[in-house]
Amino acid sequence: MKSAVQSIILLVLLSVSACGQNQSSPETGLDTNPKTLDMNKPGLEVATLGGGCFWCVEAVFQDLIGVYKVESGYSGGGNPNPNYRDVSSGTSGHAEVVQVHFDPQEISFEEILEVFWSTHDPTTLNRQGYDEGTQYRSVIFFHSAEQKALAEKSIKEVAQELWDAPVVTEISPFDAFYPAESYHQNYYSLNANQPYCRAVISPKMAKFRKKFEAKLKPGSTEQDK
């Protein structure tokens, strides 16, 4: 009976606090992420990835050594300059994504993809947990022929090793990235006690940090203690 009650409570919390619902904040346009490093460092590359709610994906990649900035936004749709309401309607064609700015001398694109496959379910079409719709699809927007080839190779090798069911991740050429509203940026770090963060992101982060401990920036595991 206790476990049933706990499950009901969890469902209620998730239903009222799904990714992006009932959130508002001033649009400062400022980067408030303390984990952002020197963006003027030469040789940085960009990966554009979607794996469900961008709050979750952003939090994961912010912790990795070699990642200099992670920004949440929208890609893959037809209409320019979408806002969250457009995307969350599921009709804009855009996916919630993050752009990961990384130094390939410190972390390779292949390692970025290994983390990507390990921290979301690429076998569920247009859904991650209780977040459902095309805006939550699993997707890699490649920026070069090399990224495309590595993504296709990684699906066949790494993803299929990790997952028993067929991988449905979309691999598409990158077209445009539209930054999400400022209140979506650095969301988990600023709102760790929000119900969705406690119920969904915190357990995901604990598993991720345990599996990839050797790849984490100093101090990243303090939140788990």
Image (tube, rainbow, N blue to C red):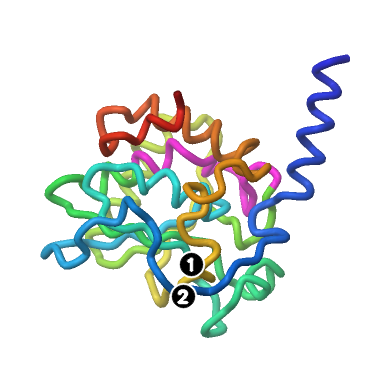
Q: Residue 103's quadrant in the figure?
A: bottom left
188 left or right of 110 in image? right
Which residue is label 2 attached to? 178
The image shows residue 76, relative to residue 2, as above or below, that is below
> Crowdedness of circle 2 by 10 Å Cα count: few (<14), some, many (20+)?
many
Q: Are marks 1 and 2 in contact (CB under 8 Å)?
A: yes
Which residue is label 1 attached to? 73
Task: Indicate the position of residue 99 as horizontal and vertical percent values.
Answer: 38, 62
Q: Secondary structure under badge 1?
A: strand
Q: Residue 70's quadrant in the figure?
A: bottom left
Q: Residue 129 in magenta? A: yes
Answer whether residue 92 is visible to the viewer in this image.
yes
The image shows residue 174, relative to residue 159, as above or below, that is below
Specify start and end residues of the magenta stretch as a single range: 114-130
What residue do we see at 22% from left, 62% from top? Answer: 45
Task: Indicate the position of residue 177 as horizontal and vertical percent values.
Answer: 42, 73
What residue do we see at 25% from left, 28% from top? Answer: 214
Toward the viewer: 210 or 160? 210
